[in-house]
Image: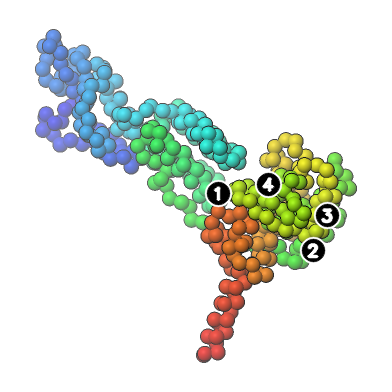
Amino acid sequence: MFNRLETGQTPRSTGVPVCGILPSVLNLWRRHMKSCPHRLRTHRKCGCPIWVQGTLHGRWMKKSLGLRNWEAAQKLVRDWEGGNSAGLEHTSVADACTAFIRDCEARKLTPPSIGKYTLLTDELKEEFTGRELASLSVDEVRRYREKWKLAPISSRKKLERLRTFFRFCQESGWIQINPAKALKHPITRPAPTLPFSDSEIEKILWATEVYSTQGIYGEKNRIRMRAFVNLLRFSGLRIQDAVTLSRDRLTGNKLLMYTQKTGTPVYLPLPESVLKEMNEVSPVGRHFFWSGNGTPKSAVADWQRSLAKLLKLADVKGHAHRFRDTFSVNLLQSGVPLETVSILLGHTSIRTTERHYAPWVKSRQLKLEESIEKAWKLT
């Protein structure tokens, strides 16, 4: 690498831009000592200190490298131009992942959120083993994303987590830009909300009467399944909130719900028949549908398997979230305002509720029908 500023040649980058960073023009030269017989900066075959001068990702710099070996100096400059720029800490991907998870824990994120970030960072450690964080290019991150075997909406959420990780690294001073920011979101086409029909609900309730009695609960299995189904149906709770529901959340027939995602307190009256079934399941325990042993995640997995068996027995396609959809749609079709339904569902924004349930809002549908009928009369 010669000093092109002295030879009159046009400067050009000695490396390939990475992560969208501005091109660099760095020139190595020797600063000869008084005892050295050479005076030309371009002379390499001596042991004088090596300096660098030029622009690095748009920033001017002139400094000693603290090196005397020309090959070592060239390698260092190539690393800088490839992303490990001067002034940035040389942090490995593994160390950055560990620091990120510690920060998530310090921020008191929920265990499910920390679990998702942990899965992501474990993948990054395996994908970029032994790599320095600042050496990752946009293309490498894009190829990593190509390996995901996920549905569009899941891929979109994972990309947001990836951007959050790299933003943390950027704010920590380990990289100059966020390489994941250049990755575009996958196209998502949200599936229409499909609540259970009245006939499907009848089939599901019938299936609870003939559900298997094998296992530690025996005959109580059927009571547990019916009570759990009706709780989901009349409360709109997410499955984890329903599984971990504790007795102290009930005041009379009112259910105090701290929704899993928002932590917002919401009071909801429940039918007396549902309360009676829940008390039959667990008349004295702290939780209605969980022994309290093990983790909530494992308890939720158990109930998901039980619901899958129940729906198969009823010959109905679906999953636990369809009970939540049924709860929401029934309220909207009864004329309950969308804002109220959004509060009951624990959504952080009414836009979320509107995106999923707007077609079921009764007032809007009536207004639409009136407008069309009026148009027909005019024609």
- Residue under numbered circle 4: 240
At a point 40% along the width and 33% down the height, the residue shown is 172
Cα distance, mark 1 to mark 2? Answer: 32 Å
Nearer-N-terminus badge (4/2): 2
Mark 1 neighbour class, 10 Å CA radius: few under 14, some 14 to 19, many 20 or more: some
Residue 71 appears in the rendering: no
Q: Do the residues labelled 4 and 3 touch (CB within 8 Å)?
A: no
- Residue under numbered circle 1: 154
Mark 2 neighbour class, 10 Å CA radius: few under 14, some 14 to 19, many 20 or more: few
- Residue under numbered circle 3: 276
Q: Which amino acid does label 4 sit on?
A: Gln
In the rendered image, residue 203, in percent from the top left (x then y), is placed at 79, 61
As drawn, the residue found furthest toward the right would be: 219
Q: Residue 195 carries which label?
A: none
Q: What residue type is labelled 3?
A: Lys
The N terminus: image quadrant: top left
In the rendered image, residue 243, in percent from the top left (x then y), is placed at 72, 46
- Residue under numbered circle 2: 202
For the residue labelled by badge 2, is the local secondary structure a helix, a strand or a loop? helix
Q: Which amino acid does label 1 sit on?
A: Ser
At a point 82% along the width and 58% down the height, the residue shown is 273
Q: Nearer the viewer, mark 1 or mark 3?
A: 3
Q: Are marks 1 and 3 in contact (CB under 8 Å)?
A: no
Mark 3 neighbour class, 10 Å CA radius: few under 14, some 14 to 19, many 20 or more: few
Cα distance, mark 4 to mark 3? Answer: 21 Å
Nearer-N-terminus badge (1/2): 1
Residue 188, above or below 183: below
